[in-house]
Amino acid sequence: MAAQLGRRLRRGATSGAVVAAAVAALAASQAPGMAPPPTDNASGESIGTGGATTPPDDSATGQSPYYTDLPPLNTPNKPGTSVDLPIVTGPAEAGIPATVLAAYKRAEESIRSSDAACHLPWQLLAGIGKVESGQARGGRVDANGTTLSPILGPQLNGAGFANISDTDNGAYDGDTSHDRAVGPMQFIPSTWATWGQDANGDGRKDPNNIYDAAQAAGLYLCANNRDLAVKADLDRAILSYNRSTEYLHTVLSWFEYYKRGTHQVPDGTGVLPNDRSDSTSGGTTPARVTPTKPATPSPSPSPSKPPVTPKPTPTPGTKPTTPPPTPPATVRVVRIKDAGTGTLTATAGGVFTGRPTVVALDSAGKPVAGLDVRFEITGTTGANFGGVVKSVTLRTNSTGTAVTPLLRAGEQLGTFTVRATVVGRTLAAVAFDATVTARQADTLVRSDAKELTATTGERFADRVLVKATLDGAPAASVALTATMVASATDTEPAGKGPHFKDANGAPVRTLTGLKTDENGLLTLPDLYADGEAGTFLLRLTAPGGGTVLVELKVTAPAPEPAPSPSTSPDGTPQPKPSSTS
């Protein structure tokens, strides 16, 4: 890359100032409540004006020509504004072909899941796609998203464009002398070699496939930690695609136009631009220079098996071969099945021992890659994926397998279900039962050695303090049960002796719902003695087997001293008896 741009002529001579004025007019023409193009908080300049005089050295397209048509001023309204979008069944400037629109939106969703800080909007991809190829020649793509014939730019031989010698031996562009921009997003082969993607799961990175190309374009725009919500980064991203101020303003005009509303039109019916920056009219078919070595076009699409455009063979002098058409994953899959998930159990608040896993298979029992599978948690439960969500949609890998993120249990105990279904098909679901059990402690001990005593009818002077551990570590939030028992072998609560009190002061000899703190400690409520004296036992138990017996002693009050002989019962002194001799 790092190609230098020669002087270019174009029909219509749309200057940067004219385009900027059109963008401003576009904003001003919106329905009430529509905001003008955003501005950069640091400089206060409108998007598209800052940094345009110092573009980066590289470009994705090799400075190939592009369509310079601007959107109309009567931009569409979003639903909910003064006039809702009309139902459109034919071509219109705001319409984007269905498959092309789906590719842009899928790329936005995919990249935001992996690089949310980039803030990539699909409308930016639509703006670039409009300028680069007229939305893949008005959506002339097959059901798999591949253009019905390759979209190739002119030879980049330095004659008015960048001078880029062949880098791919003609594999992508059919030209073994110089490179050409390829596909609906117009990547040059050397850039595609770095950024190419397989976004439709057919096992190939094809620049002529709109899904692959849109995903690659989104990643390219987000490179170098760009935040596309920031004016300077947005400018840099667009200029990295084509180092031209006019290109920047043209893309931004379409970006703003699509942000104000668009709609889906059938594939192949999109409006095609006319003016190009190389003075070549696109007419109803975008201009294309015939390559030195033609690329092999895709076969005609079939409703049951949409074709995939093969790459031209890189070997000079040999005739390219066309592999059999490959239907998309959603057509090939016939079932999904459990791929050895095993038992799903976890303690409350913990992580499950396994993760729901499925494998997608075709009619021959072979794995299907690139298939979207939705996993959803059903039932009343606090469980979630990754500590956040109740459902995730995942794509099967090269072995046809999809594995959920870590499944985390909530506080609610019991069983719930995780259901796996194929997105876009009504195949049988795979259900996984998952069970949440109580937090456990394998050991309970008293935390002090104080003797616990009380007098009949009185409160015990000290409270019971215990510690719960699991595998030697403090066991937090473990639910303990405290029960008064007559002996170590009794399972039923004692009918008399020490007790706790409820809110009304009534005796309670079994307490539940007690929980240890973050250090595994628990201090029990006050204990009271009734009229029974003796030695009694308090048993504490925990899920996981932890148990401890605490001894409680109740004594009768000390007897009152007997009356003195020198004192009458009423307390008056009595005379001493006389002695006789």
Image: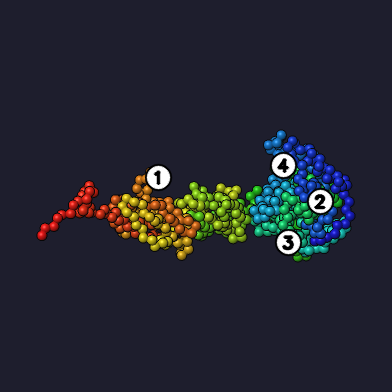
Residue underneath mark 2: 50
Name the amino acid, label 1.
Answer: Ala
Report crowding for label 4: few under 14, some 14 to 19, many 20 or more residues within 10 A (C-alpha): many
The residue to which callout 3 is attached is 194
- In the depicted view, which residue is nearer to us: 558 or 354? 558
Eye-nearest disc, 3 or 1: 1
Indicate the secondary structure of the residue bearing disc 3.
helix
Q: Is residue 424 left or right of residue 535?
A: right
**At numbered mark 2, what does the secondary structure look like: helix, strand or loop?**
loop
Q: Position of residue 40 (x, y in %)?
A: 77, 48
User: At 43% across and 53% down in the image, what residue appears?
Assistant: 514
Residue count near mark 2 (Cα–Cα under 10 Å), binned few <14, some 14–19, many ≥20: some
Percent x, y of residue 261: 72, 41
CA separation in Å, label 3 and label 1: 71 Å
* Mark 1 or mark 4: whose residue is earlier in sequence: 4
Above/below status of 233 relative to 257: below
Give how far apart the Cα atoms at labels 4 and 2 are: 27 Å
Q: Which residue is mark 1?
A: 503
Mark 3 or 4 closer to N-term? 3
Q: Secondary structure at mark 4?
A: loop
**Mark toward the viewer: 1 or 4:** 1
Residue 214 in view, yes or no: no
Q: Amino acid at mark 3?
A: Thr
Measuring from the top left, give residue 536's x and y in whole percent.
31, 57
Q: Quadrant of the N terminus?
A: bottom right
Measuring 65% from the left and 55% from the top, which residue is drawn there? 114
Q: Amino acid at mark 2?
A: Gly
Query: Which quarter of the rendered picture does the C terminus lie within?
Result: bottom left
Label 2 vs 3, first from the N-terminus: 2
Label 1 to label 4, Cα distance in Å? 65 Å
